[in-house]
Image (spheres, coloured by chain):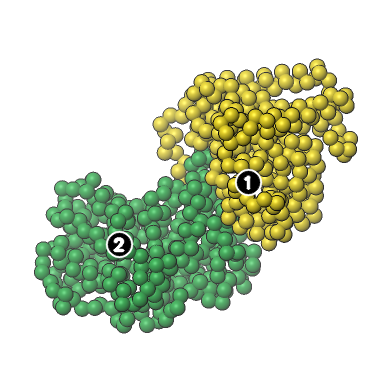
Amino acid sequence: MTRELHLYEAIREAIDQCMQDDPSVYIFGLGVPDPKGIFGTTLGLQQKFGRDRVMDMPCAENAMTGVAIGSALVGLRPIITHQRVDFALLSMDQIVNQAAKWHYMFSGQKSVPLVIRMIIGRGWGQGPQHAQSLESWFAHIPGLKVVAPTTPYDAKGLLIASVRDNNPVIFFEHRWLHNISGDVPKESYTVPIGKGKIVLEGTDVTIVTFSYMVLESMKAAEFLKERGIHCEIIDLRTLRPLDTEIFLSSVQKTGRLVVVDNDWKTGGIGAEIVSTVVENNIQCLKEPPQRIGFPECPSPTSPALSVIYYPRAKDIVKVIMHVMRREISDSEIPSMHAGPLDIPDISFTGPF
Amino acid sequence: MTESSCELSPELLKKLLYEMLYIRLVEEEIAMVYPEQEMRCPVHLSIGQEAIAAGICAHLSPEDVVLSNHRSHGHYLAKGGSLRRMIAEIYGRKTGCCNGKSGSMHLIDLSQGFLGAVPIVGSCIPIATGVAFGTKLKKQDAITTVFFGDGTVEEGVFHESLNFASLKKLPIVFICENNFFSVYSPLSVRQPPGREICSLAKSHGIESFQGDGNNVLEVYQLMKTAIEIIRSGNGPVFLELKTYRWREHCGPDYDNNIGYRTEDEFNAWKKRCPIETFTDYLLSNKILDQQALQDMTREIMKIVEESFRFARESPFPGPEILMKDIYRS
């Protein structure tokens, strides 16, 4: 039985059900028991499960990640929450040197079943240190799994799968997806880690993307359909391990590849996608692959700057028209975004 | 030696000597064969610091957990870790405790509660704190002990961990082996003068003690006190134990002549050798005689030789090991 939930409610439900099903699961993070409940994702959990299992923490991301790892080594299953990816950088030693490697370097004797939720900030002038995603950093590391769901259905299913996985999983949540709605089953279920999804079938060009940029790609595809261009959109959902099969077979069909990244182009996930296609099946490409990513500068705060920083549907349309060798002028492409460009919708009133 | 040693049985006193001698003879064997270039990984030897490992681990059972750092051979052995698997690991063989994947700096023996050693300075501390946290949440009795050096207390994560351990009153003993050097850097260029390391832990609200890390009975008694405090629910406890590393930071050689420390300083510490001083004590109090000492040495050397032989005869890991165990299914 499904009903419509916001993505933040789907996340909350996933955590709730995981904690109900398995007493070894616990969650902590700065702000987890706060009245605002991490954008609604942890509301009411401390009242239900108590302070031991829904925990606030000292301002110590590095040590607390180590604490989570240590507790996982003796049988607990922690979920850490960072309100911004940027804050997690203080714990890179524990994530990369320890969590990712413990199972390998100790030859399988101990594993680290740890989930780290990292929220990607954007909008309302979050600025250079509150808006990074850096997913390619984490997707680079053997020993980590990295997921980035788009829909409420996938968010709940992937979070449950991540908690049940016996390895460290980095779980990216995009701030601009928290308020979107979608059908979510009431019961506990999983979405497999490592499998992408074709969210729109098409024959002319393959768009490979993930997270919030799936929404922008869908808007672009809607506009292009009216001009006779049929896009196939792949939502990767998992960034490590990458579902190479899904986009290789799509590009085999369409012959054209556009990657819409959620981060800087250089060394981003898009670079990995393009390389994989070129290495495996360059002959199928009718046109050079294209990557869309952020300009090579930190995320600016002023709305006047952030609107030219973040690529959106309009920019995706331009690139696809170019790949299709078709002309289009700027004025022909509508905004495809209601209201101010530095927020996803009018419900997003900031400040955080 | 302290008066309280008369409370300890001769068996225990001999066991303490045995453990220290065992560590010393293993480490000296490593130092001797290392120039053969078949042990192809960094080794950080425990020579000179044996009393700490022996005195602390004498209290611990296999259910109690120990974590350590790059200089972990002594802790691993005193906790009962398999010598064969340690030496095979250093030789990079398949029969090593990590199938040869990790070498000297990442020892593990779960059967004895040696949960792991990792060489990033400070990294084992929050992990050990988490083990204690998990143990407490699960209402188990195990005590967690973590070993680290004086340089570690300069890392931020040390303070973060002690703050949390103090907040949650965790059942963990933090052991700082202060050997005054961080590679070649003396304490004086790294920490302000007149501030004792144990005072850092005190300021986190943790019961802290300082002691002579070369006096195995003093170490033993301090750990006894630490465990009593923890069992009464008043953990954690911090012990700062002063000692001295005999060989170079990493590797088998002596390096008292390259300029960062003096031969005189080394000799002064050598006179305080934890094994020699304790042996003299046992001999003069007739708890041990020369014959027993020789028997003990011979017995240990037999074990050492057998383990080295086992390691050298073991196969290397095949290519199938390379991609194994990246993930747990």
Chain A painted colour: green
The residue pinned by badge 1 equals B188
Q: Determine the image quadrant of residue B88.
A: top right
Which is nearer the eye, B272 or A298?
B272
Residue at the (52%, 45%) spot, across then down: A102
Name which residue lies at 24% across and 78% down.
A335
At 17% from the left and 55% from the top, the residue drawn is A288
* Left or right of residue B17, residue A261 in this image: left
Looking at the rendered structure, the kind of residue marked 2 is: Glu
Helix, strand or loop at mark 2: loop
Give the total number of marks visible in the rendering: 2
Nearer to me, A350 or A273: A350
Q: Chain B: what color?
A: yellow
* Image quadrant occupied by the N terminus of chain B: top right
Mark 1 neighbour class, 10 Å CA radius: few under 14, some 14 to 19, many 20 or more: few
Residue B16, position in %: x, y?
77, 32
Q: Which residue is mark 2?
A: A296
Q: Which kind of residue does numbered mark 1 sit on?
A: Ser
What residue is shown at x 89% (from left), y 35% (from top)?
Answer: B6
For residue A199, what is the image quadrant? bottom left
